[in-house]
Every structure is written in C-alpha cells, then in structure tokens.
Image: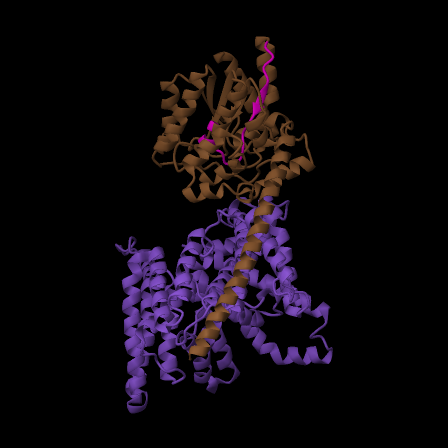
Amino acid sequence: MEDSLYISNSNMKKSSTKILICFITILLCLYCFDCILGYVMRYISQRNLEKEHCGLNYCLNAATADIIILGSSSARANYIPQLIGDSINSHLGTKYSVYNTGNTYQDFPYFYCEMKSLMDRKIPKIVILDLQPWTLSGPTNMSALKFMRPYYNTNSHVKEVLDDNETFLHRVLMNFEMYKYNEEFFDLLSSYLYPTTKYPMGFWALDGEEKDYEIIPENDNREVNPLSKQEFEKTIQIAHNNNVKLFVSISPYLRYIDRNSPAYKEIVNMCKKYNIPFFDYSNDLELVKGELFHDTMHLNKKGATILTKKVSSELLKSL
Amino acid sequence: MVVNSIIFWLFFAVVSIPYFVFFRKSCRGQNLWLLLASYFFYGWADWKMIPLLIIITIVFYWLGLQIEKNNVSNPKRASHLTTLGVVLGVGVLFYFKYLGFFVQEFAHLFESFGLKTNLSTFSIIMPIGISFFTFKLISYVIETHRQNIQPTKDFVLFSTFIAFFPTILSGPIDRPGEFIPQLSQSRTFNYDNVAEGARRIIWGLFLKVCIADRLFGYTSAILDNYTHHNATSILIASLLYSIEMYTDFSGYSEMAIGVSQILGLKVRENFLRPFLSQNNSEYWRRWHMSLTTWITDYIYMPLNVRFRDYGQYGMYLAIFINLVVIGAWHGANWTFVLFGAYHGLILVIIAATEKRRRKFEKKYSLKKKAYYKYPRMLLTFFLVTLGLIIFRANNLSECFDIIHRLTYDYSFPFTNKTTFVFGLPFILLLIFKEFKDENKYNIHFLHSKKLSVRLISIFLLLICVFLCGNLDGGQFIYFQF
C-alpha cells in the first residue's frame, strides 16, 4: 500500500513537472508572439496615418478638418463632405475642409473620443452630429467599444472611455496585444497592404435601391437612458467650451418615426435648451423613398446627395 | 459561468488544485469537494433551483435503494417504484418545460372558440439543465430495476453523479453504469489525462469562439430578419447555421469532456463527425450521441419490442416515435415536434429502402466510390440543414415562410466581413480535420507523436482563439434546452 502510494506520488510529481514545463513553454511563446504583434501593429498604424480611408485610426490620430460629421454608419453613408465643403466655401468664401467620421454602430463614447482627439490637433469650426431618433433610449452599444481597443495605450481619450465603460477583467486583458487587436488587426493590415481611395473624406457611397419595403411606424416607447443623456450633454459642453458651432441632424429612414417618443422629445428639448440648430429629415417625404435607399437604414449615393444639399442649405442659413 | 469564460477557468483552477493536492488519497473527499463545486457552479447559474436539484436527488437516491431491495424479494413493488421514478422524472420535466406551453396552447384554443381565459401570463421558470439531469435520474432507476447496476449507498457519490458540474448544464448525458464506478475510486493527477483534457478543451474553445460565435453574427442577422433578405442570403445563413450549431454544441461537449478528463473522469462522447454521414440514419448515430443512445435504449428498444407483432411497420412506427421524442425533448414548441417528425419520416424511408439500397450498392460496388459517397454526404447535409430551419424557427408559420422564401429571389447575398474573413478559413480547417480523422490519415497535429508538433499546434490554435475568435461571444445554444 505504501509502495503504491509512493509510486503514485512520484508519478504525480513527474506529471506535474512535465505539465508545468509544457504550460510555461506555451505561455512564453504566446507572450513573445504578443509582443511582436504589438510592435507590428503599432508600426502599421503609424504608416496608415496618412491614409484618410483608414477610418478610426485616421480619425483618432491624424484627421484635421474645419467641419466634422459625427455619427454611426448612417452618417458615414448619408453625408457627402465634398458637397458640404463646396457649398459653404462658395457662399462664405472660406477654405474649410470637411471630414466624415461616421462609423458602424457608434455612439456617444466614440463621439467623445473623436471630438477630443480632433481638438487636441485642431479645433474644428463646425460639428454636425447625426443622431438616430432612438439614440437616447436603450443601453449604450458596449460591443462597439471594441473598435477602439487597439488605441487604448496610444490615445488618452480612448483609455479614459474604455476604463469608464469596461469591466476590471477587460482592463486587465487590455495589457495583451492579442486582445486589443482581436479582429481589428485585419482592418489595419488590409488597409496597409491594399490601400484604397474608395472612401473620400470618410464618406462611403452606397449603391442599389431598396425595392421590397414597407413604411412601418417605429414606435419607441422606451424611457430615456440617463447615461446617454449625460453623454449627449457632455458632447454639447465640449463643443460650447471650445466655441465650436454644433448642429444636430436626424437622417431619414425607410420607416415612419414617432416624434412623440421620449427619446426623440429629449433630443429636441436638449437642442432647445442649448440653442443648437436641429434638422430633422426622418419623415421627409422627399427623402423617404425606396429608390433613394441602399437599405432601410442607409441612403444610397443619390439619396445622400439630396440630403447633403438640404443640410448644406440649412447650415448656410444658420451660419 | 460558461465554460468559455475566464471566470470558469479561475473556478476550475480553484476546484482542481485541492482536488488533486488535499483530497488525492480520499475518494469520498474528492467526491464531496466535487459536489460542493458542482452546487456552487449550478447555483451561480440559477441558485433558486438548487433546492429542487437536492430534493429530486434525495428522492431518486431513496428510490434506487428501494428498487434494489425489492428487485428479488418483491419484483412487483420494484416495478411500481421504477414506474414511479420514471413518472416523477418525466413529470418534473413536463411541469417545468412543457406545462406552460400546453396551458397557453389550450388558452389559444379556447380563445379561438370565443371563450375568455386568464392564462396569458402563466409562466414557469425552467431550471437550467433540467433536460439533462432528469435523464440521468431516469436511467439510474431503470438500470437499477434491470439489475445492470448496483445502486450506490453513498449519497455524496450519487449526488456528484447527478450534479457533476462539467455536464450538468448541457451534457453529455452520462450513464450510471459507466460513471458511478469511476467515482468509487480516487483519481490521481495524470499527465496523459491532463494533456488530452487540455487538448480537447483548446479544440472545443476554438470551435466555439472561432467558428460558432463568428457565424452567429451572420446567421442571426439573416434568420432573425429573414423578411428583409433574399433567398441567397437565407440559404447561406441556413447552411452556416448547421455548422454553427455543430461547432457550438460539439465545442461545449469537447470542453466538458476535457475538463472531466483532467479531473480523471471519462464522460460519454457526444459527436462523431456527423456531417460526414452518408444518410440521416448514420447522422443520428453520430450527432448528440449521449441523447440518441439514451432514447434508443429507453424508448426505441421497448417500443420495438412492443410493436414487434406488426412486423416491419411496427419498427417504422418505433423509429418515427423515437425521432419525435428527440425533437420534442428540445423544448415546448411545435417546431421541435415537426423537426422530429421530419427526421422520423426520412429515417422510416431509409429503413424501408435499406435492403434494396444495399443490394444495389453491392451489385455496383458503390460503397466506397467517391462519386457515390460525397454526393450522399452533401445530400445528408442539405437535409439536416432543412431540418435545422424548422428547428430554429420561432413558430410553424415562420418556418414555412422561410422555406417559401428559399424558392425565389436568388440575387446577390448579404455579406458580413468578420464572418467570412474569420469564420470561413476555420470552417475549411474543421472540414480538413474531420476528413483526416475519419480516414485515419497519419497526420495528427494535436496528437502527433512529437511533443514539439503538439505544442506548436496548441500554440497556433490559441493564437487563432485570441486573435481571431469572438471573445465577446455569448451563451451556448444548448443551454436553453
């Protein structure tokens, strides 16, 4: 009995040592890979800074423009920077540059990082904030924050936002490059290897038409999310404190937007309270047509041209 | 606490260190520690249901002992007690899983006749993992009655078998005859077990985060909003959903088997490359094997014996009922019943044509011919996919609507960069591995004879998981069942 126990103990010791060696070897290899990945990705990010099409990296670290469009993918597809710039510059005799920073799923934490990062380099004259009628209801889209993880160590505003919004565990994991660049490495790498000029000034032209559609009422009865309201106010304050002229705009959608929803009313109230020009194209009959939409949420290029012209003329009235 | 979360791995480390260090000499100590860990794990998921789990464990423990006591001296009483056990197990399952559904169906029926009911708010919270642990309990009393096992007198051991944390939420469904004897011996820390367990965990993690969670974004975007998408997108999403379902569930099973193996316990295999099956009958022998063998042993076999007077038709009926039960086991929805009936019908056709098919295959020596084998594999995959469309739909009308939409508008599909960039290469890797394993080629990355190759394979898989996997992924699909 004692013999077998001795054998068992000795086997266990051998097994533990072997397992421990394998475990440490794999951990060391992973650590080395992680360091190399971080180095390569930082190099690529740096090289990509000159490229406008490079989305978030360009917005956070290089973009400088006099007129900035902030918003989600709707903003990116609906506002043509070139048209806004031409319209304003020809009427006012200025040489304002315009950049569309719209990005998929993005929300106030993202707008905050973009505005602050832009202002660190150059304070814009005008900011057009494209909001969805339901932006202030429902939770903040936390999964969208992962787009910003690669810039955690290089951008103090991103660090601030991620530290505020992510859990302790995520903050620990942020020390690993593989976690930070998870999924995002592909965009950085592909725009480095295959640069494209498809997206001038951040605008993504969409084609196609939405044929099979039905305009259904969008009833959003959810209460206003206090956190989103606070973030909205924070964005307004930043603009006011820096003498930036802020405009709030609501894009059209292929659905009927309920203007009595608490979230919509709150946007209107906030704009009134802070004296912000507010343009609402959500139920604009000239725009809410299938042939002007790529899908129910995004205008095609033809639709974007009409909307941008409307926005530009409104901007000129307010300037 | 899902098995692909960091919290689980911290919990597992806390469980396994004392398990091998302090309790290695005591089987009872190990079992008690495992039981406490299992209740903690279950309580983390749903602490309100722990009393139910404990009470039902006590009742079945007592039933097991009583059945054994009466098996020889009073067989009639033993038989009654077994029936009581089965009725109790099925009753608990029915109450928590199906009663709410039937009540609402009756309410709808009454309302369609103009009678008002007040049952629209009737709802029962289903304990997580109930479909899995009730099946373990039922098999325990049946096996005891059949005298295939000796019921254990050790309550801690029995409770550990029922609540064993790697398998309680989503299986595999262990059999008492295989699992209880393992719990009767103390388990030592063993290199082979730990290494093999770790390999299976990493492979399972890869299947879950690199394939299943990557495909989820696309399949849910299309199938949850199928009215906005064309037939091409729905078809691609449906085909990918089959792969998502497989990798999600087999990923979980691999991790559960791996965790158990590290703890020195062997649990049942659940999958054997089901998409390489050449017909649906073979598919069901390779898919969710712990459930299908359970239902075959305890439902199909007795039914087959009962219906034997009806000859072949009796067998067909037994097959059909068997598959309907498998379908209905998944939940209280007519779609699951239809899913079972659909597969049942296919299996009946296969059984009815088997003799002629074999004769034909023999005559032309077709069995191993690639031009015969691979199209059959593809056909089986398409038939399984069609079944999963029924399975995934929220109700019957949605299911028929999706199938109807598959018949027209094959224009350019909706694309999702992350799904196709990160998901498809790994699907190809999975297909390669499945064929390699099926044909027993002599290349085994994770099981190579060389330690260096094994370590490099693990290292590469971990890089895929951390760099390309969906680290913010969600729950396992089978948790809802």
Instruction: Give the answer, above or below, for where B77 lies relative to B294.
Output: below
**Left or right: where B353 falls relative to B205:** right
Task: Pinpoint residue A243: horizontal percent, then vertical percent.
Answer: 46, 14
Chain coloured purple here: B
As drawn, the residue found furthest toward the top would be A93
The colour scheme used to paint the residues is: by chain
Answer whether residue B398 is magenta in the image. no
**Left or right: where A226 falls relative to A238:** left
In the picture, the quarter occupied by the C terminus of chain B is bottom left
Task: Pinpoint residue A147: horizontal percent, then vertical percent.
Answer: 53, 37
Task: Pinpoint residue B17: horizontal percent, then vertical percent.
Answer: 42, 61
In the picture, the quarter occupied by the N terminus of chain B is bottom left
**Residue A282 seen:** no
Instruction: Give the answer, above or below, for where A54 lies relative to A11.
Output: above
Q: How many marks?
A: 0
- Write down the region rendered in magenta: A94-112
Q: Quadrant of residue A88?
A: top right
As drawn, the residue found furthest toward the bottom would be B73
**Residue B143 seen:** yes
> What residue is at 32 percent from the left and 90 percent from the top?
B72
**Left or right: where B102 falls relative to B212:** left
Q: Nearer the viewer, residue A288 or B235?
A: B235
Instruction: Give the answer, above or below, for where A270 lies relative to B354.
Output: above
Answer whether residue A108 is magenta in the image. yes
Chain coloured brown here: A
Task: Pinpoint residue A217: horizontal percent, then vertical percent.
Answer: 43, 36
Q: Nearer the viewer, residue A36 or A151?
A: A36
Q: Nearer the viewer, residue B410 or A33?
A: A33
